[in-house]
Amino acid sequence: MTNSDDVTGDENPPDPGELVLTPSRDANVGGLAVRRALPTRGRRTVGAWCFVDHMGPASITPERSFDVAPHPHIGLQTVTWLFSGAFLHRDSLGSEQLIRAGELNLMTSGHGVAHSEENPGLTSGEMHGMQLWVALPSTSRDGAAGFEHLTGLPMLDLANASATVLVGSFGSFESKARHDTAHVGVELDLHGGRTSFALERTYEYALIVASGEVFLDGQVITTGQLAYVGAQRDECVLETKGGARAMLIGGEPFDEKPFMWWNFVARTQDEITAAWRAWTTRDDRFAPVASPFERIEVAPPPWLTSSL
Ligand code: MN
C-alpha cells in the first residue's frame, strides 16, 4: 500500500469506555478504491497500529487490475490480509510471495525496504482485504528489514463467530507473527447473533467493519467506519443481524509520537527528508525491487518546497 495523503491532528482522547465512531476517507491505491480508516484527524494510533486501508470488494479483470508499483517504507510493519482474491508481493529483500485469502503477509521495514504489490494475472474475481501498518518502536525502527508469510493462523470458535488471530494473543491463542510491541489483530467472522470475548484491560481497541453491520454498546457500526472502543474494558459484546466481518485491532497505547508522511513512519521531519532523499536519489538504503512496474516517485515533502 501507499499513502498519498497526510493527516495530522491533535489527539482528543475520549473518556474511557466511550465508543467513538469515525468515517473512513476514500482513497485510491493501485487502481483500487480503498477506505482509509486510520489515521483520522483525531486519532493517529490504536496501540501501535497507525494505518488501516480497507480495499474493495472490487472485481479484478484483465482490464481492471490492482497493481502497486515499487515504493519504499521506513519505521513500520505492513500487515496484509485478504478476505478474497490474491496478489503477488515482491520486495527489496528478494521476497516474491503470492498471498491468498486467509494468509498473512508481514513485512518489517526497519530502516528501509521497498516493495510492490501486483496482480499476478492468475486471478480474476473479487479482491477484498485490508492492509494495516504497525509503527515500529525506537528499539527496532532503524533495524533490519524482514518479510514473513504465515499460513495456518490460529482460529477459534466463539459463540456465533469465528476468529482468526493475525498478530499477537487473543484468549489462549497466539499468532507466530513477529510483533515488536504489545498489540493484537483479529479477524472476526460474525455469523449473526451475539458474540462476546475477553479484552485486555490495558489495551486500547478499535473495530473496523469490512462488511455488514455490527452493534456495540447500542450503536451500529457500518462498513467504512472505525469504532474506537478504548481501554479499560474486560469484555466486548458484539451483535449482528445478518452476519458481518470485522477487524479488531488493539494494543498497549503507543508511547512514542509517530510522524507520518507518504509511506514513511518516523519521529521528525529530518528523518522523513532523509528517507525521501534516499528513495529519490536511488541510494542503497532501498535496494531495487525485481518488478516489471516503474518505481513510484513522489514530490518532496511540503516543508522542503515551502522554504524554496
Ligand atoms: Mn506499501
Image (spheres, helix red, strand yellow):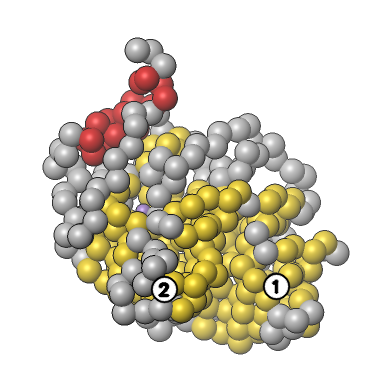
Amino acid type at mark 1: Gly
Rendered location of residue 35, percent (x, y): 57, 56
> In which image quadrant can residue 8 be found?
top right
Residue at 31% over, 79% down: 122
Rendered location of residue 36, percent (x, y): 56, 52
The reply to whether dot 1 and dot 2 touch (C-beta < 8 Å) is: no
Disc 1 secondary structure class: loop
Disc 2 secondary structure class: loop
Amino acid type at mark 2: Thr
Q: Quadrant of the C terminus?
A: top left
Residue at 56% over, 84% down: 156
Residue at 58% over, 79% down: 163
Crowd band around label 2 with a 10 angstrom C-alpha radius: few (<14), some (14–19), many (20+):
some
Q: Which residue is mark 2?
A: 61
Q: Quadrant of the N terminus?
A: bottom left
259 on left or right of 118: right
Q: Which residue is mark 1?
A: 212
Residue 128 vertical placement versus 135 (above, below):
below
